[in-house]
Amino acid sequence: MVDRRGSRSPHASSWGRAGGDVRPAQGRGAAQTRCGFVALIGAPNVGKSTLINALVGTKVAIVSHKVQTTRALLRGIATVDGAQLVFIDTPGIFAPKRRLDRAMVTNAWAGVHDADIAGVLVDAKRGLDEETDAILGRLAEVGQPKILLINKVDLVEKSTLLAIAKVANARLAFAATFMISALTGDGIGDVKSWLAAHVPQGPWHYPEDQITDAPLRQLAAEITREKLYLRLHQELPYQSTVETELWKEREDGSTRIEQTIYVERESQRKIVLGKGGQTIKAIGADARREIADMIEAPVHLFLFVKVRERWGDDPDRYRGMGLKFPDE
């Protein structure tokens, strides 16, 4: 849980502490600790967000069946055996067709190049498909150590897993290979232990109890976007976005939050609203419960739906999502 100031509660939480201050932990020197950034990269829908939640031990990234749910780089933080592991959840790598696509893919590769270790996630059911093969080819240009994470191992035969590992390691020199299930947690402990032993020595970058660097306003917007996608997975294009416009703490201890859901066409606005406003009410109810749990305070959530035509060509929207606006 988090309180409204961003400090940790002694209770467990579905979301983590939000902050943003970067400083070494008090009383911990470089000789005693390790700290490193680990970028998770892979094709869309291979389970990166589910994996980062499993690695951190609580929910810091939204999860949906919709491709390209993750847009900007999101960091989740875990402490293992005296090491601080900063996991970077990157957008899925695919062949970009639009400006937003290009910004997301560029952002993902930037996260890989800035990390100390790159974790390549492969869906065991899909195997080394065309998208994953292209990722492996480009990763040859990345000098950082790389590990192979074969996900969803509970869904395929062992012989298939071994075949994937053999071919992938023939393509790229992986420092280690892990068979995991991000959903069940199988193998996650082994991954964390290996990373804790191999990230660089040095002081921690974040306080001991911080598990994400995203501010509360952003996390709240991400929660609502998750509920939007879960309810309208088939009907709504992924270009829709959510922005927190108002965050006001009231005298009675509750928080008033106003958010706007932006879509590109009037027909999409009607889909989000639903007949008699029932769809937007249901989305709001789901989001309000989770946001209230996150900040440990009653929440009054007000959602608005607006049409913002061609918002995918607006540089300000990209900056708001933490993305660099592509020139072309």
Image (tube, rainbow, N blue to C red):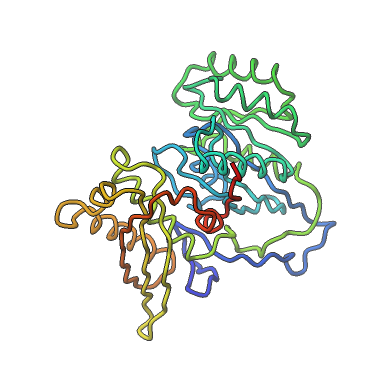
Classify residue 151 as left or right of residue 175.
left
Residue ranking furthest to the bottom: 251
Is 228 on the left-hand or right-hand side of 115? left
Foreground of the two, 178 or 61: 61
* Residue at 53% from the left image edge and 50% from the top image edge: 57
The quarter in which the C terminus is drawn is: top right
Position in image of residue 122 (x %, y %): 56, 28
User: x%, y% of residue 277?
Assistant: 19, 57
Q: Residue at x 42, y 49 (%)?
A: 310
Find residue 202 and report its horizontal and vertical position in percent.
Answer: 80, 55
In the displayed structure, does residue 122 sit left or right of residue 141? left
Q: Name the spot of residue 256 as percent of width and height, x first.
A: 36, 74
Q: Quadrant of residue 208?
A: bottom right
Q: Quadrant of residue 24?
A: bottom right
Q: Give left or right: position of 135 versus 238.
A: right
Residue sitting farthest toward the right: 31
Q: At x 33% / y 50%, what residue is drawn?
A: 228
Instruction: Between residue 68 and residue 176, name the one nearer to us.
Output: 68
Q: Is residue 323 above or below residue 235?
A: below
Counting the numbered discs, the total is 0
Residue 142, placed above or below residue 280: above
